[in-house]
Amino acid sequence: MIEATPPPEGDSSGFVEDARRQDAFGTVLAVTISLLIVLASSMAILYVWKGEDGFIISGPSTALKSWEWEYREIIGANNETISGLDGSGVVVCVVDSGIDLSHPDLRGVVLGGWMDAINGQADPYDDEGHGTAMSGIIVADGGLNGIAKGVELLVAKAINETGVGSDEGVSQSVDWCVQRGADIISLSLGGAQGFGSGLFTTDQLEQSVEDAMDNGVFVIASAGNDGQDDDGDVGSPGSVEDVICVGGVTRTGSIWSGSSKGDNNGRIWPNPILPRSDPDMKPEVVAPGHEVPVLMAGGTGNSEWWGWSSGTSASTAWVSGALALLLQQNPELKREGSDGRQSIEAVKEALMQRSDMAEGQSEHDDHYGYGLIRVDLLIDQFSA
C-alpha cells in the first residue's frame, strides 16, 4: 500500500511517500524515499527551450546559484582548506532511482558502474527523478556544481518510477556497491527499523549495511522527514550504530522543520533498542536540507532541468560528497587503507568534535546532532 503524506505544516516543498508491504511473517516493512522532487516557483527555475537544432539552455536561475553558494559557505566548502579537492580517487555509490546522463550538468559523467534492481536494464536511466537530483548534488558540473565532482560514481537503481522500493532491492544494491569497490554508499532513503535494531537485526538491508561497514565502507543515510509528526526516531538504516545519519538545516543553519528527531534514550516497546552513546547518537550531523538546488531528470515528464527540493535526502548527498573530499585528502581512511570499521569510527569521532553546534548547544541534540558538518574542519582534524 502506498501512502502519500503532506509536507510539514507551512512547508510546500515536498512530501513523504511510504511503500509498505507484508513479508512472509506478516511484519510490516517499509522503504521510504525521504524526499521527492517538487518544483519551486518560476523564480527558482529556468526552462529549457527545445529548438530544431537541439537544446538551447539558459541555465539555473540566479537564486539557485546563490542558494548553492550559501550552502557551500556554511559547511566550509568555500574555505581555502579544500581548494583543489574534488573527490578524485574516491568511489561513491548512490542507491536511488537512477540517473539521467542526458542532463546538461551530467553529460561529462562517465559512470564507474550501473545496476538496475528494478527493471534489469543495461543502460542508465531515471524514471522518477530523485536519483538524478541526489547524484547532481555530488557530481553536477555546469549550471550547478557538485561538491565532489571528481569522484568515480556508481549508481544502483533500487527505487521505481513511483518513488518506492523493497527492502530486498535496496539490500542487493548495497551489496553490489561493496562488490564494485565503493568507499562511500549514499542512501537518501529510509524505512522502518528491523526488530531488535541496535541489539541484533532481522532486517536484510540493515545486515547488508553492517557487512558494508565491516569492509570499511562509509554508509551515509537520511534521518527522515517526520519532524513535525515525529514517530519517535530516525529511519533505518540511518538508525544503525556506525551509519552516519544526517538531518537537515536551512541556509541560515537552523534546523529544517521536517527533519526527524533521534531517540537516544533506548526503549523496550515497540522495537527494543539500547540507549545510544557518543559518537553514535542519532542523527550524527546536519547538512543542507531546505530549498536545496537540484538537477531535474528529463525522462520524468518535466520541462525543466533545474529546481529545488527540501528534505534529509539532499542532506545525505551533501555529507556523502563532503566525506569524499576528506577521503581524497586522507586516502588512508579509504576502505583499502582501513582495518574494518577503524576509519569509520575515527571519522565519527571527528564529526562529534569538529561539527558546528547550534547557538547554546554544548552536547548532542536529538534534532541537530553533533552539529552542522564542516568539511574544512574535518580535513584540518586529520591534517593536524
Image (cartoon, rainbow, N blue to C red):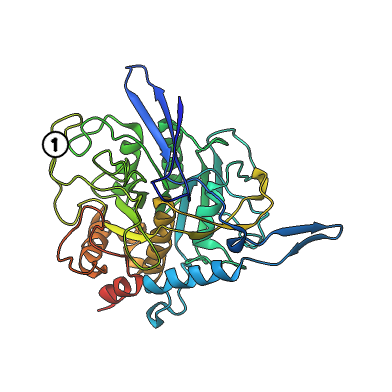
Instruction: State the image quarter where residue 232 is shown.
Output: top left
Q: Provide the secondary structure element on which disc 1 rests.
A: loop
Which image quarter holds the C terminus? bottom left
From the viewer's perspective, is 202 left or right of 170?
left
Instruction: State the image quarter where residue 218 is shown.
Output: bottom left
From the viewer's perspective, is 339 left or right of 141?
left
Residue plotted at (46% across, 56% down):
92
Q: Residue furthest front?
A: 10
The location of residue 60, given as percent across then percent down, is: 62, 65
Residue plotted at (70% across, 67% down):
58
Residue plotted at (44% across, 62% down):
90
- In this view of the protein, which residue sits in the foreground, 255 or 377? 255
- In this view of the protein, which residue sits in the foreground, 15 or 286? 15
Q: Can residue 172 be seen in the rendering of this structure?
A: yes
From the viewer's perspective, is 187 left or right of 377?
right
The location of residue 365, given as percent across then percent down, is: 20, 57
Amino acid type of the residue tagged 1 in the rendering: Arg
- In this view of the protein, which residue sits in the foreground, 60 or 377? 60
| Total numbered badges shown on the rendered structure | 1
Residue that mark 1 sits on: 267
Residue plotted at (55% across, 33% down):
118
Q: Residue furthest right?
A: 52
The location of residue 173, given as percent across then percent down, is: 46, 40
The location of residue 1, given as percent across then percent down, is: 45, 24
Q: Can residue 183 be seen in the rendering of this structure?
A: no
Q: Residue furthest bottom?
A: 80
Instruction: State the image quarter where residue 351 is shown.
Output: bottom left
In the rendered image of this protein, does residue 229 appear above or below residue 259?
above
Callout 1: few (<14), some (14-19), or many (20+) C-alpha neighbours within 10 Å?
few
